[in-house]
Amino acid sequence: MSATSSPMQATPSGWQRFCRDRAAVVALIFLAIVATVCFLSPWIAPYPYMAQDLALGPVGPCASHWLGTDLLGRDVLSRLLQGGMVSISVGLIATGVALFVGVLYGIIAGELGGAVERLMMRGVDILSTLPLTLIVILCMVVFGQNIWMVFIAVGGVSWLTMARIICTETTSLKSRQFVEASIALGQSKRGILVRHYLPNLAGIIAIYATLTVPGVMMLEAFVSFLGLGLKAPMTSWGMMIKEGADIMEECPWLLISPSVVFALTLLSLNFLGDGLRDAFDPRASRR
Amino acid sequence: MSLRYVIKRLAEMLPVLLIVVAATFFLAHAVPGGPFDRDRPLPAEVQEKLNAYYGLDQPLYVQLGNYVKNLLHGDLGPSLKYPGWTVNEVIEKRIPVSMALGLVSLVLAVVIGIPVGVLAASRPNSCLDRVPMGFSLLGICIPSFVLGPLLTLFFALYLGWFPPCGWGLPIHYVLPAVTLGLITAAPLARLTRGKVIEAGTQDYVRTARAKGLPLWRVWFLHALRNGLLPVVTYLGPAAANLVSGSFVVESLFDVPGLGRMFVTAIINRDFMLILGTTLVYAIALLVLNLGADLVKAFLDPRIARGQQA
């Protein structure tokens, strides 16, 4: 943070600043590797993730099963990759949902301004006092435990911060001269939205999207941990941690590997988000 | 800061609570399956009688109306799954457990988080800063359901210092309280550090140092006081979370608190209990947020004046 407190000194581009942030770059590389490996898992996983080997049962890490096997003799590494695919997809798609709702809401509120804006933002304030975790849990139970519901429920409660930030940004954009000039030239609302608002908001949207992903993944894991997320034999990191926690006395490896991978992924996402924010939005550390 | 402000804030809570009740009510009733589903289905007549007895056969809006009416008398209705128990009784029995655990965790979080943050801020970018902040980042990224089992694995199963689960003795508090406390302390320490560093650049802190006050007084009394505002904002909802029970930690350590009750109530489709628990949580959240705002106004009188103007 101290590095960005004086953005006026030199003016390296955002990417140059980002590349100087070693933690963020390492995090980006780590995330890229994890995501690639997880999404290639149907082809490169050593075993099919649901293949049981009841005769084998649970064994610790060994040469043929690098991370051991679970109670049903399923290979933990393969399940970890499959679970990662699910957890990362949830993170990305639910963030997409949150982004869509939040950006739309924020732009509308900011553009209309005045009483409408105040009303809409008051609505956001009220929503953020609701016990959202409970609502996600209820939604999962009501609409069934399938992966689409996880996307929608988790995304549906995660858009509030985004809406707030976008609203503030839109309000300040609206009074900028190039936007006023476009209006004077008779540019349509849609044109202004596409040509001016979205490009100027893109950076901030990207930054806060990165910061939303870990929260969303945590929420999914939390719901899965309570046994209300996906259904077996589908798996996610949250579910694997739950399974591991249930029998950690006998088989600690079932708990340790998903916990470590999950924590490292969240850590990297946070580093990446902070790095992006510091590099591209120096004002934000004061937000 | 006037009584009027407090009353206004309290009045604003009512619509929010109504929204919570209505939303939860419809969601809870949309859940497939009912509270009287058993492995062996009950005879249809019995089921009808039970539904009629609890008023579940009436249209939803009538049920909601009745519920709100009873609520105004402070009656949360009967539990559908525990015959003979009212929701009030269930909650009264469970909430002291959650509150005790929550308070211990909160105290732990404040006692660890704030001093660590101030210490780190007093020597930015030294070991005293880097090491605790590394741990703090780790604490932010490790969810309670990872930290809890890992602590149990290490301290209960390998070292055998604490019982892995159970409830009743003070020693049972240690692991769940440490889990919750550390998870809450981690963001707290970061927040405190950031704000105290900001305050530390101000003239009055330099003056305090220049006139030779002991360093701990400069940092903890002068700088911290002005850095405390956002910390209090963070503590409001965090405290609500802790006091009304963390679902995960209570499930993990077999704590008979309100958080676990909520999960059980959902699984049992006990509508009344779901509503009651959600309401308690929402009230705790709103009241503690108000509390946080009042503390802020006390710390910084400018806030109160701004709100009255």
Image: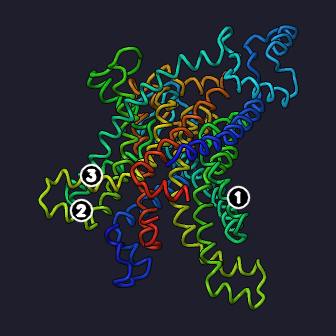
Q: Is residue A277 above or below residue A65?
A: below
Q: Is residue A172 above or below residue A101?
A: below
Whole-angstrom CA distance, mark 2 to mark 3, is 14 Å
Q: Earlier in the sequence, mark 2 or mark 3?
A: 3
Q: Residue at x 76, y 86 (%)?
A: A187
Local SS, label 3: helix
Q: Mark 2 points at which residue?
A: B205
Between label 2 and label 3, give the one nearer the viewer: 2
The amino acid sitting under disc 3 is: Val
Q: Which residue is drawn at 74% across and 81% down?
A: A191
- For residue A193, which quarter of the picture? bottom right
* Nearer to us in this view, A276 or B193: B193
* Nearer to us in this view, A263 or A244: A263
* Nearer to us in this view, B226 or B35: B226
Q: Mark 1 points at which residue?
A: A119
> In the image, which disc is placed on residue B118?
3
Q: Count residues near mark 1 (Cα–Cα under 10 Å), then give few for <14, some for 14-19, many for 20+.
A: few
Q: Residue at x 57, y 57 (%)?
A: A161
- For residue B163, which quarter of the picture? top left
Whole-angstrom CA distance, mark 1 to mark 3, is 39 Å
The amino acid sitting under disc 2 is: Val
Q: In this view, does B248 lie above or below B143?
A: above
Local SS, label 2: helix
Report in which chain the residue with disc 1 lies: A
Q: Where is residue A281 shown, x and y percent of the image? A: 47, 72
Q: Count residues near mark 3 (Cα–Cα under 10 Å), then give few for <14, some for 14-19, many for 20+.
A: many
